[in-house]
Amino acid sequence: MILKELYPEIEAFASDTLSTDSSHKVYFEQAGNPDGAPVVFLHGGPGSGCNENHRRYFNPKKYRIILLDQRGCHRSLPNGGVENNTTQLILSDIEAIREKLKINKWLLFGGSWGATLALLYAEQWPQYVSGMILRGSFLARKKDFDWFAGQGVNQLLPDYWNDLMRDYSSNTSSELVESIHRDVFSTVQNKQLHAAKAWALWTGRVVTNCYDFEYELDANDDPEKLINETRIEMHYAYNRYFIEENQILDNIEQLPAVPVKIIHGRQDFTCLPESSWLLHKAINKSSLTMVKNTGHLAGEPAMVDALINATDEMTHLAE
């Protein structure tokens, strides 16, 4: 079977910034067909950002593709800024961008933390959602982060975990987050960078578990970028993602009655496949695709195929 690949590279046809009341400037752009079905791409992390390949999961002739860098991320300013940076404020930014672009309804496309935001947005503003595509869903419960930071995947990757514990010995995920949070927000740059590298090496090794290479940090990585990304991620983990425990599932009945495609790698060590299973069982009109021999990353070949199949099937849903 021939797998679908990313659509050809395209340039954005417009870009802008959303100026918030709290001095953040949120970067967003549009690509594809200005008259196409609107879709918003919600990136993961928290702390990463969008790139040019994220435009390529959508047929550019049929979709009006909106990408945004969340507060403090990538091209948004201040980069790495955590003041006035919460989940609710990001959700408000997404809604403000929809209003600014005069979009009636749009398709939500989110992976990992982006799936978290998509679900929370749809629960708060269901009237503006035409459909959802969720990859590697993260429900942001305590058990979800505990799995990643000391109560689960460490047993599958004990040697990698041992490398992290040489610097950050802890008995609980909370202790680990507190320690890395303390260091990455230190006033000593060497301490900040050490914490950022330790966390980035662990997370990189976990998310690439399905690849046949040994993940290593890139010596050419921008230290400031690495620190800023880790600052955002630790800020959210430290604050329990600024939502109530089990909030997404508790409010699942608030979702609109729209098609929802849920896609998860069977070998995802980052976000438990159980999360997508729970969503599928709870959401009417949802479909679930478990992708064999695939982990967490959107760029794995079988995952690309599954995601593009999903976006191709959803073009008729958005107004």
Image (tube, rainbow, N blue to C red):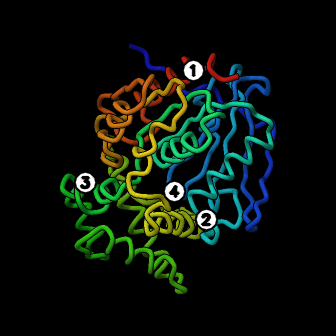
Instruction: Say which label, 2 or 4, has the lower sequence index.
Output: 4
What is the crowding at mark 2: few (fewer than 14 residues within 10 Å), some, or many (at least 20)? Answer: some
- Residue 153 tag number: 3
Rendering coords of residue 213 (x, y %): 33, 46
What is the crowding at mark 3: few (fewer than 14 residues within 10 Å), some, or many (at least 20)? Answer: some
> Horizontally, is 124 left or right of 271 in the view?
right
Residue 204, quarter of picture:
bottom left
The amino acid sitting under disc 4 is Pro
The reply to whether the C-beta atoms of the residues labelled 4 and 1 are less than 8 Å apart is no
The amino acid sitting under disc 2 is Asn
Could you tell me how far apart the alpha carbons at marks 3 and 1 are, in whole angstroms? 34 Å
Residue picked out by circle 4: 46
Task: Work out whether residue 202 or residue 172 is closer to the camera in this orientation and state it.
Answer: 172
> Horizontally, is 33 left or right of 269 in the view?
right
> In the rendered image of this protein, does residue 23 appear above or below residue 301?
below
Could you tell me how far apart the alpha carbons at marks 4 and 1 are, in whole angstroms? 26 Å
**Residue 208 visible in rendering:** yes
Rendering coords of residue 49 (x, y %): 60, 52
What is the crowding at mark 4: few (fewer than 14 residues within 10 Å), some, or many (at least 20)? Answer: many
Image quarter (top left, top right, bottom left or bottom right) of the N terminus:
top left
SS label for mark 3: helix
Instruction: Say which label, 2 or 3, has the lower sequence index.
Output: 2
Instruction: Say which label, 2 or 1, has the lower sequence index.
Output: 2
Task: Work out whether residue 109 or residue 247 is closer to the camera in this orientation and state it.
Answer: 247
Instruction: Say which label, 3 or 1, has the lower sequence index.
Output: 3
The amino acid sitting under disc 3 is Val
Mark 2 or 3, which is nearer the eye?
2
SS label for mark 1: loop
Instruction: Say which label, 4 or 1, has the lower sequence index.
Output: 4
The reply to whether the C-beta atoms of the residues labelled 2 and 3 are less than 8 Å apart is no
Could you tell me how far apart the alpha carbons at marks 2 and 1 are, in whole angstroms? 32 Å
> Horizontally, is 140 left or right of 257 in the view?
left
